[in-house]
Image (cartoon, grey):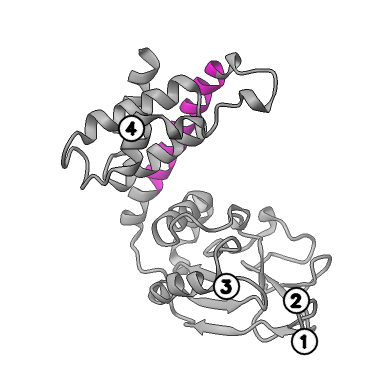
Amino acid sequence: MIVYSNLHTITNNKYVDWEFEVLNELNDLTARTDANCKQHTRFLFEMDSVPLEEQCKIVETLKDKLVRITYSGSKSLHCIVEFDPSMENQCRLYYKQIWTYINRKYFNGKCDSKCINPSRLTRRPGVIRKDKNKEQKLLWYNPNGYFPVQWQELWVEVQEVMKLAQLHETLERSLNAKQTAFTGGNDDDPNGKCENNPKVKYYLNTSFLKESGNGDSDSSFFTALCVAHTAGDKQTIQKIIDKARREGWSTTQINHKLRRCGEM
């Protein structure tokens, strides 16, 4: 059933003028939880930390992939991606991985990760937002606007997300061991400090065409990674990895380089 909410209570009475609705249909009104979701084919994307003007530019290019866009009445657009009902089982099993893939590929990784669950609340279009006294406007609606992808294609991306998650777990374990040397207070926190290292700075500020595409992309990437890894600088490592992925390095290749850093 379609369910509406005022943050504290839920109802299936569409005539109650509440500001929110539950993203996916629920089995019943016992609770607004992921376990009570009947449907898992809708995904919510919201960019609170991005200026509204920039959000509009990003979303304008994605209309063929969205079923609905709602202005929140404040500082964000609530964008809903919906998959064909025939993909319900796959969406249910890999909901978080699918959300992560779409966020990275189409929203530049800028969406709030709190939106990653199927029972999330989203702004209900056509209702007045009481704290702002503004209408939550419906900006786009395509009732048959299912996300244009076949499961075989999506499964490749889901596997990549899972590999990357495993990479992060491996990295976390390795860095936690290294950070035992950094104790005593915030001044000893290494995160972000390696970004100004000349070798790291060179890699982050140099545009490489693709993996091994021009100049010393391979050695520069590896050297920067080792510098940050040795210091246990998670923040800078993530920046290095993000840049490498944009240049075409696969998760497997990045993982291999990280293992080599750990062996040095």
Q: Earlier in the sequence, mark 4 or mark 2?
A: 2
Gap in angstroms between the C-alphas marked 3 and 2: 24 Å
Determine the residue positioned at 66% across, 82% down. Answer: 136
- Out of 143 and 29, give the one closest to the viewer: 143
Name which residue type carries label 2. Asn
Q: Is residue 26 left or right of residue 223?
A: right
Q: Which residue is mark 4?
A: 254
Gap in angstroms between the C-alphas marked 4 and 2: 48 Å
201 is higher (above) or lower (below) than 58 = above
Residue 254, percent from left and from top: 33, 32
Gap in angstroms between the C-alphas marked 2 and 1: 9 Å
Which mark identifies residue 12?
2
- The part of the chain drawn in magenta is 158-178
Gap in angstroms between the C-alphas marked 4 and 3: 34 Å
Helix, strand or loop status at disc 4: helix
Helix, strand or loop status at disc 2: loop
Q: Earlier in the sequence, mark 3 or mark 2?
A: 2
Disc 3 crowd rating (10 Å Cα; few below 14, some 14-19, many 20+) is: many
Q: Earlier in the sequence, mark 4 or mark 1?
A: 1
Q: Nearer the viewer, mark 3 or mark 2?
A: 3
Name which residue type carries label 4. Ile
Residue 186, percent from left and from top: 67, 28
Residue 179, percent from left and from top: 57, 19
Q: Earlier in the sequence, mark 1 or mark 3?
A: 1
Q: Which residue is mark 3?
A: 77
- Residue 246 visible within the image: yes
